[in-house]
Image (cartoon, grey):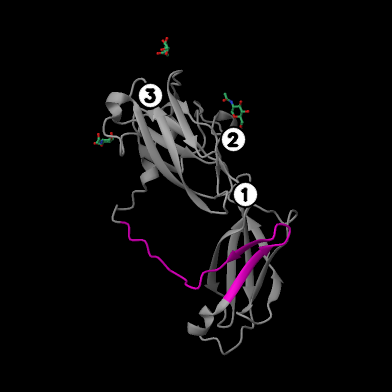
Amino acid sequence: MKSFLSLICRLTIWSLLQTVKLGPVLVVVEADSGNAGVQPLSKIAIHRALFALHENASVKAYPLVLGQKGEDSQWVIVELECPGPSADDWVAVFSPAYFNSSTCPTDDVRQQSPNICSAPIKYKYANESNDDYSKTGKASLKFQLINQRADFSFALFSGGLSEPKLVAVSNVISFANPKAPLYPRLSQGKSWNEMAVTWTSGYNIIEAVPFVEWGFKGESQTQSPAGTLTFHRNSMCGMIHVLLIDRLSNSLTI
Ligand SMILES: *[C@@H]1O[C@H](CO)[C@@H](O)[C@H](O)[C@H]1NC(C)=O
Ligand SMILES: *[C@@H]1O[C@H](CO)[C@@H](O)[C@H](O)[C@H]1NC(C)=O
Ligand SMILES: *[C@@H]1O[C@H](CO)[C@@H](O)[C@H](O)[C@H]1NC(C)=O
């Protein structure tokens, strides 16, 4: 693996001169779920959510613009005020930010259509790090958000995870450059001298040409165009760009 690690790839979207550098280390993490296969988000019965908006409840999130120094993740403060707090109130993060019934698919033939058709990407109980929330109705929570090419909003629910009632919705916040090419990863190709470089961005092929600049450090670099694929719903997963670098020198030991 030694000589491979000296290979530096640069992913560039030329129209923006955005550059993502691959770190020198490739880390493979194997998840060991001690939670017997229960995904924490699966406990949320979002399809049962009801509206119970309260005029005096509020959720405020800041900063409004994230990643202004090019960061691809940032901590966000969410401040709650709720006139009728309870210990099982919780705060959900939605992305894209608008999650009202206008986003429900029109071909849903269920008898009772749901009020909310998208699922939170994260949540925390309102009392987390605010022990007296259920008395004061005031709390301040921190969430770490990553740039995933869509804006964010926060919602306060009462009724616990199983009978959620939407009490208040926050302002919308977003990353300064939601489409930035991010999260480069390397994997081995089909043959020994092939390497796949994969990354994600919000740019469709008609907006910018994705390519990889690669070569040995300090030597002349090759620019190779990458392929693009996407998964719908409304392409919110972003564009996934892949380049297979083949005919790598046989002095590379992998
Ligand atoms: C909201 O607060 C105002 C002012 O304190 C109060 O007059 C009103 O009754 C409250 N609304 C509800 C639904 O509690
Ligand atoms: C916070 O709320 C959760 C869910 O209702 C509860 O299990 C936990 O005991 C509460 N923690 C405190 C400090 O009140
Ligand atoms: C639902 O969201 C859309 C934007 O997606 C917005 O135009 C509309 O006003 C919202 N409706 C309600 C009831 O909040």
Disc 1 is placed on an element classified as: loop
Main SS category, magenta section? loop
Q: Earlier in the sequence, mark 3 or mark 2?
A: 3
Taking depth in this image into account, of 137 and 117 the one nearest to the observer is: 137
Reply above or below: 178 against 113: below
Does residue 238 belong to the magenta stretch? no
Q: Residue 173, position in %: x, y? A: 55, 38
Q: Residues within 10 Å of mark 2 (few under 14, many from 20)?
A: few
Going by the image, does 86 lie left or right of 166? left
Q: Are marks 1 and 2 in contact (CB under 8 Å)?
A: no
Going by the image, does 224 lie left or right of 156? right
The Cα–Cα distance between marks 3 and 1, rounded to whole angstroms, is 33 Å
Q: Identify residue for label 3.
A: 82
Does residue 12 belong to the magenta stretch? yes
Q: Which residues are magenta?
A: 8-33
Q: Residue 137, position in %: x, y? A: 33, 25
Q: Residue 79, position in %: x, y? A: 42, 32
Q: Visible in this render: residue 164?
A: no
Q: Are marks 3 and 1 in contact (CB under 8 Å)?
A: no
Taking depth in this image into account, of 119 and 174 the one nearest to the observer is: 174
Q: Earlier in the sequence, mark 1 or mark 2?
A: 2
Tell me: is circle 1 under 8 Å from ligand 3: no
Q: Residue 213, position in %: x, y? A: 66, 72
The Cα–Cα distance between marks 1 and 2, rounded to whole angstroms, is 28 Å
Q: Residues within 10 Å of mark 3 (few under 14, many from 20)?
A: many
